[in-house]
Image: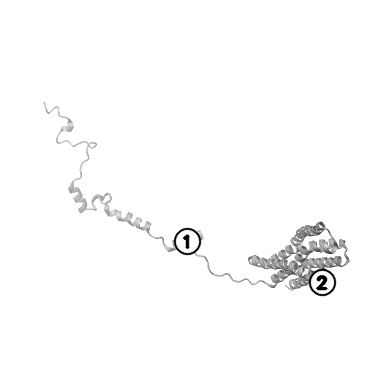
Amino acid sequence: MARRGRGRGDHPHHPARHDLAIPARHPAASHSDHRHPRRGGRAEAAEPTADAEPESGTADIAEGADPPASLDRTANDQSGSGPADTTPAPRTKHPGVVWALAAFGLLNGIGVQATNVYMPLFAVRELDFSLVLGGATAALAGIVGVIARVSWARRMAKGASGPHLLLVLALIALAGAALFFTAGATGWSALMWVAVALHGISALGVSVVLMSALMRVIPAPSMVSASGMVTAGMFFGFALGPLGMGLLVSSAGGFLLGWIVVGAVYLLCALLALVLIRQRTRG
């Protein structure tokens, strides 16, 4: 009777349920796997052991190692932080036309500032203008000069010859200096206003013609240094003009001698423009 009450799982010879207990691996099976690694492909399916760890260790070492020099050079080239090129740039030799334009700017600058600075004083002291009218002469010259620059720039944009325009401007400025001299010698104030207008039309419009003519003959890589040369010539003339005119006015010759010298400077500008025209014709 007691044997009938025993359950199926209590039988001593019945295997246990798989969901309740996991059979332990027999030492003999492990020994068999170690001795025969190729049998049944068990070695390939074996779990990874400590022998596989050197691969990760090698990767860690590779991560901490310095990158190759080629990668460093590539990164420097892409970021722009590579070593700077210390090779000195070749010295630019300017052609003769650049020096000629710079000389024209120098001479014109002398005449421009000699006239601009002493024109109001000349009107007040020699022609008995009031202080307001003396200042109005400078204002009129500035207004006319602005209009002249725009007009001459448009002429250059339409294809006018730079050297020919420089010749025209030099001759007009020479005529203005002659009228300044005549106004001082005769005392005719009307000539003073005509001279001021001619001064604004011509001498104050030279700079735009100079730069336009320079852009036509100088390649782009040399444009920066060439324009710097021409601009330096003009500003050096701006500095010399008032100083020279002051020395002349304070001398025995007075303003009349000063206007003669200013006219001579514009005459040199005209001769230099003829040289540029001749050089262009030969070229």
Give the image location of residue 33, x and y in percent.
21, 51
Q: Which of 44 and 175 lies nearest the eye of the viewer?
A: 175
Give the image location of residue 19, x and y in percent.
24, 36
Left or right of 96? Residue 192 is: right
Q: Nearer the viewer, mark 2 or mark 1?
A: 2
Q: Which of 89 and 230 lies nearest the eye of the viewer?
A: 230
Is residue 145 depicted above or below 9 in this figure? below
Left or right of 242? Residue 191 is: right
Residue lying furthest left: 1
Give the image location of residue 246, x and y in percent.
76, 68
Local SS, label 1:
helix
- Label 1 amino acid? Thr
Image quarter hosting the N terminus: top left
Q: Which of 1 and 172 lies nearest the eye of the viewer?
A: 172
| Mark 2 → mark 1, Cα distance in angstroms | 74 Å
Badge 1 crowding class, 10 Å Cα cut-off, few under 14, some 14 to 19, many 20 or more, is: few
Residue in view at x 33 percent, y 54 percent: 56
Q: Are marks 2 and 1 in contact (CB under 8 Å)?
A: no
Q: Who comes first in sequence, dot 2 or dot 1?
A: 1
**Mark 2, residue position:** 253
Residue lying furthest top: 1
Question: In which image quadrant can residue 258 be found?
Answer: bottom right
Is residue 200 depicted above or below 4 in this figure? below
Give the image location of residue 45, x and y in percent.
27, 49
**Mark 1, residue position:** 74
Badge 2 crowding class, 10 Å Cα cut-off, few under 14, some 14 to 19, many 20 or more, is: few
- Label 2 amino acid? Gly
Local SS, label 2:
loop
Question: In which image quadrant can residue 211 be found?
Answer: bottom right
Observer able to see residue 161: no
